[in-house]
Image: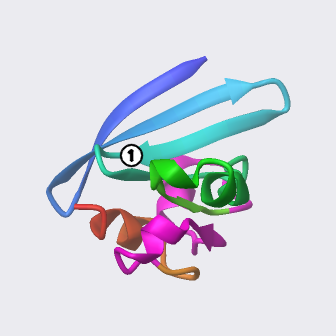
Amino acid sequence: MVTLTPILIEGNPFTAVTVRLPKTTLLTVSNDKGYIMCGALDVGLLNNVLADRKIVAGRAVGVKTIDQLLKAPLESVTLEAETLGIRVGMTGEDALLKML
């Protein structure tokens, strides 16, 4: 099952997506500039193989809900995200606000 939910963070619109799969759930929150995602995100792939795409993204691990994804500290971020001031350890919500 796939669930799309519009959410507001400090009045700014984002889209939350939950994909329920056998034995796992994929979570992401995005806008037109970038996204945060659960542990399934391969930041190394984005930084190395897909570097030319300049993807702004962050990864939080151990999260099971969108609310947890927003509150969790990011475990890794892309190089492009770092150019916006997004850092490892900041919450997903704070990272999204840097993507405005």
Q: Is residue 92 left or right of residue 22?
A: left
Q: Which of 84 and 74 lies nearest the eye of the viewer?
A: 84
Looking at the rendered image, the quarter that the N terminus falls into is top right
Asked whether 11 falls inside the magenta stretch, the response is: no
Q: Which residue is mark 1?
A: 30
Q: Is residue 14 left or right of residue 66?
A: left
Looking at the rendered image, the quarter that the C terminus falls into is bottom left
Residue 86 image offset from top left, x and y in percent: 43, 76
- What residue lies at 53% left-to-right and 70% top-to-bottom? 79
Residue 19 image offset from top left, x and y in percent: 61, 28
Asked whether 76 falls inside the magenta stretch, the response is: yes
Residue furthest front as drawn = 52
Snapshot colouring: rainbow
Quarter where residue 95 is shown:
bottom left
* Residue range (magenta): 61-86
Q: Type of residue at label 1?
A: Ser
